Image: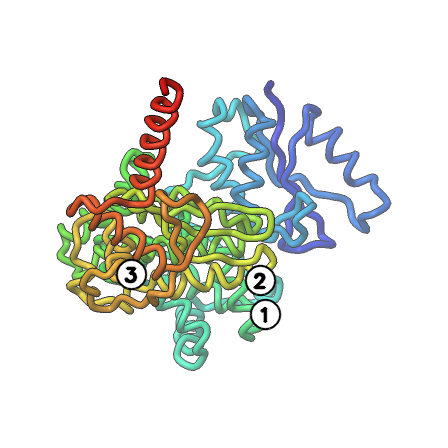
């Protein structure tokens, strides 16, 4: 179903825009409806509207793209430059049938970005040279502004230049105002431009090494549309540009980042980590009172309990991931294993009595589930002793408890048979 997408402003809320949808003409009906409300002191002004196919789905996607800019998460208002909203509309529209018409005419994205002056600056004669000089002074003496400017400078695009210009138009140069400017207008667009957490993570790793390599990552990621993982793309670019990044540590780093993100943004559901834990032969299971992190060793078909935490104390589980999956704790030789499962496999070799690899930090006080003695968790020493006895019996032919029972049953059978004939 087709309909209108509109952008409106209100003089009572400078710098804030309402972005919504309507099947009615926004220039007449919708504008009149909003302006007639007794909850707003001033009438609304229609800044832009367009007619688009699938406008319901389009509005949902547009609001998601702008969600980090909402002053109130339950309202359709966004604190951002009008230009940014219009760029997003133009960028997303082709995926929802395209714009049939729009009013007023939209300026293409590839034109130089215009950043409007502040209210105080509108009445002043601004000398471009002195404005540029003022920005240099701000960057020289304001550490927060300098920090954000230098960060933007590492990434492709002219975000650092636009940020520098915006500094001269801020009414206040306090830390909160500068960080808010950076977060709302520049961080998402230039530093975290992708929807996927890991894509942004790897993009930052590459940009920290080389701006040219970051540009290639950005272009390739957009072109490939998820057909190649961000990790593999990063490995290829690191090799091409010889960035000197330890790619063997990526699996550990990913789990650290994801565990932190689950705690903050995924409704605190640790089971969402399981697709990533499977790379280490790990699985998180949910019980009535506990979460249990298990490691399954395919070699001896045995499940080892790595961590058990109370459901009300998930902090310790996340802390475990952040501590134990820290690549800096392990030697270069340890990280050189080619297998995707090198990490936990080498950890549990130390638990099972093999040679302890350099850097291993999990203590050998881990419980064990012995598949041949039921599912009940038993002491590590007892479990290893059972496994050792069974292995020895298989090699030497020494009868086990099972074998002795079988012999007794056979003897009893023949005794009963003999007695019946007698």
Please tell me which residue is depicted at 46% across the width and 74% down the height of the picture: 144
**How busy is the neighbourhood of tag 2: few (under 14 within 10 Å), some, or many (20 plus)?**
some
Above or below, 90 relative to 258: above
Q: Compare marks 2 and 3 and give the one earlier in the sequence.
A: 2
Is 350 situated left or right of 43 in this image?
Answer: left
The C terminus: image quadrant: top left
Q: Compare marks 3 and 1 and give the one earlier in the sequence.
A: 1
Question: What is the spatial separation of the Cα atoms under label 2 and label 1, in whole angstroms?
Answer: 8 Å
| Identity of the residue furthest to the front in this view | 422
Q: Nearer the viewer, mark 2 or mark 3?
A: 3
Q: Nearer the viewer, residue 300 or 196?
A: 300
Residue 330 in sight in this render: yes
- The residue indicated by pointer 3 is 351
Residue 216 in sight in this render: no
Q: Secondary structure at mark 1?
A: loop
Above or below, 140 relative to 46: below
**How busy is the neighbourhood of tag 3: few (under 14 within 10 Å), some, or many (20 plus)?**
some
Q: Nearer the viewer, residue 298 or 185?
A: 298
């Amino acid at each position: 179903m087709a309909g209108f997408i509109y952008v409106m402003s209100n003089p009572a809320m400078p710098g804030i825009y309402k972005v919504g949808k309507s099947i009615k003409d926004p220039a007449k009906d919708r504008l009149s409806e909003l302006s007639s409300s007794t909850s707003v002191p001033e009438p609304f002004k229609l800044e832009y509207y367009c007619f688009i196919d699938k406008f319901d789905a389009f509005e949902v996607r547009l609001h998601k793209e702008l969600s980090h800019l909402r002053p109130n998460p339950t309202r359709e208002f966004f604190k951002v430059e009008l230009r940014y909203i219009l760029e997003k509309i133009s960028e997303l529209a082709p995926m929802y049938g395209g714009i049939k018409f729009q009013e007023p005419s939209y300026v293409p994205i590839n034109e130089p970005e215009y950043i409007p002056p502040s209210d105080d600056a509108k009445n002043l004669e601004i000398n471009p040279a002195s404005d540029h000089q003022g920005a240099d002074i701000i960057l020289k003496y304001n550490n927060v502004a300098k920090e954000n400017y230098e960060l933007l400078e590492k990434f492709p695009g002219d975000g650092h230049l636009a940020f520098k210009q915006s500094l001269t138009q801020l009414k206040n140069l306090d830390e909160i105002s500068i960080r808010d400017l950076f977060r709302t207008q520049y961080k998402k667009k230039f530093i975290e431009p992708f929807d996927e957490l890991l894509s942004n993570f790897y993009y930052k790793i590459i940009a920290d090494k080389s701006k040219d390599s970051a540009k290639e990552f950005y272009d390739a990621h957009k072109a490939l549309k998820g057909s190649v993982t961000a990790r593999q793309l990063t490995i290829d670019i690191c090799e091409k540009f010889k960035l000197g990044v330890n790619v063997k540590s990526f699996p550990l780093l990913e789990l650290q980042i994801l565990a932190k993100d689950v705690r903050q943004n995924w409704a605190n559901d640790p089971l969402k980590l399981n697709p990533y834990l499977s790379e280490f032969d790990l699985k998180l299971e949910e019980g009535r009172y506990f979460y249990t992190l298990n490691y399954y060793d395919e070699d001896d078909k045995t499940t080892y309990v790595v961590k058990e935490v109370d459901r009300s104390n998930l902090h310790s589980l996340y802390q475990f991931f952040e501590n134990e999956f820290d690549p800096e704790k392990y030697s270069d030789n340890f990280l050189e294993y080619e297998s995707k499962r090198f990490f936990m496999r080498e950890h549990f070799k130390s638990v099972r009595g093999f040679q302890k690899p350099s850097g291993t930090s999990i203590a050998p006080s881990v419980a064990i589930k012995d598949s041949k003695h039921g599912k009940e968790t038993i002491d590590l020493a007892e479990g290893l002793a059972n496994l050792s006895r069974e292995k020895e019996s298989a090699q030497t032919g020494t009868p086990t408890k099972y074998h002795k029972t079988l012999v007794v049953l056979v003897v009893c059978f023949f005794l009963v048979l003999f007695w019946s004939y007698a």
